[in-house]
C-alpha cells in the first residue's frame, strides 16, 4: 500500500472533525481551538515485541492500546482531552487490511475519548522483520483548575489507588493491558470533588512501587505503603500487584475525605506520605541489603521492603 | 543505561525552561502557555535505514534532523514554534554516549528554534538489530494571522520555491538532508510581507513534483511548472531537483509582488496555478502514457511531463 492512500483513508473517515478542529489532518500541521491559552502534551510509544506480542495481538487492539496509553497521561493530570497525533512505523509486510484495522482503531479510540486525530506520519521499515512502532501524542487542556502534577504530595497525605492492580499481562485472556479504560472521567470527577486537596497524581504504567517513587521523588517526600491494603486482582499477590505494571489505574496523594468509589471504580487508601527521613529507622534496620535511598517502603506485617524497584524498568 | 537515568539527564540539562513552560518535562504531561487559544501540532518520524544511514551518521546529526524535520512543518504553516516532544525507540546496543549525544542534539536544536522540549518517551527494542526510531512532535501557534494551509491556491497564482533543490542525499558531504535550516523565520517574514496574498504553502520533503501535487489536490487546482526555472543545486538537473526530496525548502502559491530573496535566501517563481482542465490539452497530447489525472505538469521546452510522481513515494 502507498502511504498517501492509507493517509487518505484515515483522514476521509475521521468522524470527529467537529468545531474545535480548525485545520484537520492532511495539512502540514493540524490546528485545534482551546478554551484558553494553556495546552498540555504527552507522547507514549507502543513497540512490537516490547509492549505487545505482534503475532497474536489483533491490530485493532494494538491501535486501541497505543491511544489509550497516551490518554491515560491525560487522566493522570486530571485534564481534558483535545487532540491526538499518530506516528507509525510499519513493517514492510504488514499489509493493507491490518494497517487499516490499526488506523481505524486509533482514530475511533481517539475520537471516542474526545481527542480526535489531527495529524500523523506513516513510515515503513526497510527490513521485513523490523517491528511495528506507534508513537501517540495527545494534547489536553486544564479542566477549570490547574493540572495535577506529580510534585505536590505533602507529608501526612494519604496515598490512594483506583481499581485493582496486577495481572495486566496474563496470557489467559484476563490481562487488561490491551483493554483498560483510561481513567479520564474518574480523574475529572475526583479533581472536581477534592479541589486543592488533590495534591499529586500519576497513572500506574510501570507498577505501583516504581510509579509511587516518581511521586515521592518529584514531591520531595517518602511513601510508606501497606501491603495488606493494596487492591489486588483475583489470584494476584501484592508483590505482583505492585510490580506487573500496565494497569493504567491512578495513584494519588490527597488530604481529607476521599470517596471510596467513583462511577463504580473502587478508590483504596494504600499508604501515606512521610517527610524524608521519617522512614529512616525502618530502612536502617534492614542494613546493607536495602537499596541506597529508597523513596517507597512497603510494609508486609512486621517486614519493610524498599519498593522503588518493584515495577518495570526499561533497560538497554 | 536505564531509561530513567537518561530522562533525568535530558530534563536536568534543558536550558530553555523559560516562562511559557508551566510544567516542564518529567511529569505525565508538559504544559506551555500560548498567546491565545489556538494550537497547531505535527509529528514526523526519522527511522534508521530509511531516513539516515545508522552506521555512518553521527547521533548528534540524527537528533538534529529529527527535530528540524518537524520544525519544517511549522515553517510550512508560517507559524511560531512553541514546544517539542521526543519519542525514541533505541536499539538495545545503542550505548549511553550515543544516546546522550542524540538527546542533547534534540534538546538543543528544539531550544534553538524556540520550541523547548516539554516531554518525551524512551523505549528500547527487544532485538539488537532493530532500528533507531525518533518521532518528534512539535507544537506551534499562529503568528498574528491564520496559518498558511495547502488548500488556498487559486488559478492565476504564481508558484514559488525558496532556496535551491536537489542532491540532498549526496554521499560526498554536499547533501543537506542532515544539516538544512528549517525556514521558520523566512516563512514568518514572507507571511508578514504578503499577508492574505500568500495563498498556500508547504515544505518540500518528498520532492517538488509530489509536494506541489499536494497543494494542487488540496486547493482543487492544477499546477504547471517550467523546468528551466527550477532552482537546482550545482550539478543537479531539474529532474533530480524535483524528485530527490528532503530539501525542506518552501513551495508556495501567491499573487502580486513577491520579494526575490529574504535574508539571503532566493525565492524563485517556478510555475503557475491553473484551473482544473486548463492543462488538459497538454496531457491529452501525451496519450495513454500519462498517468490518469496528473495535478502537476512540468514543461521542458516543447515537452510536458506529468510530475505528480516526481518525488519520493513511500511504498510498502
Image (spheres, coloured by chain):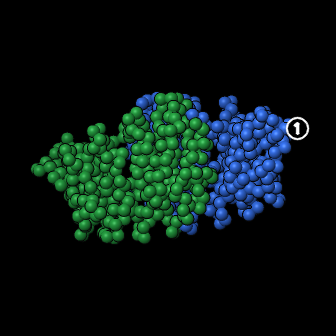
Chain colours: A green, B blue
Q: At x 41% / y 69%, what residue is drawn?
A: A145
Q: Mark 1, chain letter?
A: B
In the rendered image, the quadrant that contains the N terminus of chain A is: top right
Mark 1 Cα-neighbour bin, 10 Å: few <14, some 14–19, many ≥20: few
Q: Can residue A140 be seen?
A: yes
Query: x, y percentage for residue A16?
Result: 52, 58
Residue nearest the viewer, comparing B288 with A88:
B288
Q: Is residue B96 left or right of residue B138?
A: left
Q: Is residue B103 left or right of residue B241?
A: left
Q: At x 50% / y 38%, what residue is drawn?
A: A97
Residue nearest the viewer, comparing A266 with A103:
A103
In the rendered image, the quadrant that contains the C terminus of chain A is: top left
Query: x, y percentage for residue A39?
Result: 49, 62
Query: x, y percentage for residue A244?
Result: 28, 44
Q: Is residue A307 left or right of residue B93?
A: left
Q: At x 27% / y 61%, what residue is drawn?
A: A264
Q: Can residue B227 be seen?
A: no
Q: Secondary structure at mark 1?
A: loop
Q: Is residue A28 left or right of residue A140?
A: right
Q: At x 33% / y 42%, what residue is drawn?
A: A313
Compared to residue A288, the image places residue B139 above or below, namely below
Query: x, y percentage for residue A258?
Result: 25, 67
The residue beneath circle 1 is: B301
Amino acid at each position: 500500500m502507498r502511504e498517501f492512500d492509507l493517509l487518505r483513508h484515515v483522514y476521509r473517515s475521521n468522524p470527529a472533525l467537529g468545531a474545535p478542529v480548525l485545520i484537520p489532518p492532511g495539512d502540514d500541521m493540524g490546528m485545534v481551538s482551546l478554551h484558553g491559552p494553556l495546552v498540555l502534551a504527552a507522547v507514549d510509544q507502543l513497540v512490537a515485541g516490547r509492549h505487545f506480542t505482534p503475532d497474536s495481538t489483533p491490530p485493532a487492539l494494538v491501535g486501541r492500546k497505543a491511544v489509550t496509553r497516551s490518554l491515560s497521561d491525560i487522566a493522570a493530570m486530571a485534564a481534558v482531552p483535545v487532540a491526538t497525533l499518530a506516528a507509525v512505523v510499519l513493517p514492510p509486510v504488514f499489509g493493507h487490511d491490518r494497517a487499516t484495522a490499526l488506523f481505524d482503531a486509533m482514530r475511533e479510540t481517539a475520537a471516542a475519548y474526545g481527542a480526535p486525530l489531527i495529524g500523523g506520519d506513516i513510515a515503513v521499515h526497510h527490513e521485513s522483520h523490523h517491528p511495528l512502532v506507534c508513537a501517540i501524542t495527545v494534547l489536553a487542556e486544564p479542566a477549570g483548575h490547574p493540572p495535577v502534577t506529580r510534585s505536590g504530595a505533602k507529608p501526612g497525605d494519604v496515598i490512594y489507588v483506583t481499581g485493582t492492580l496486577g495481572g495486566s499481562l496474563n496470557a489467559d485472556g484476563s490481562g487488561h493491558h490491551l483493554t483498560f479504560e483510561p481513567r479520564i472521567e474518574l480523574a475529572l470527577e475526583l479533581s472536581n470533588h477534592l479541589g486543592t486537596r488533590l495534591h499529586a497524581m500519576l497513572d500506574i504504567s510501570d507498577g505501583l512501587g516504581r510509579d509511587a517513587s516518581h511521586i515521592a521523588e518529584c514531591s520531595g517526600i517518602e511513601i510508606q505503603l501497606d501491603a495488606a491494603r493494596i487492591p489486588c486482582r483475583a489470584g494476584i499477590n501484592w508483590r505482583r500487584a505492585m510490580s506487573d505494571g500496565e494497569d493504567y489505574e491512578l495513584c494519588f496523594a490527597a488530604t481529607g475525605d476521599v470517596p471510596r468509589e467513583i462511577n463504580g471504580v473502587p478508590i483504596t487508601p494504600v499508604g501515606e506520605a512521610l517527610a524524608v527521613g521519617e522512614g529512616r529507622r525502618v530502612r536502617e534496620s534492614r542494613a546493607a541489603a536495602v537499596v541506597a535511598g529508597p523513596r517507597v517502603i512497603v510494609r508486609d506485617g512486621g517486614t519493610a521492603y524498599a519498593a522503588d524497584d518493584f515495577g518495570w524498568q526499561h533497560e538497554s
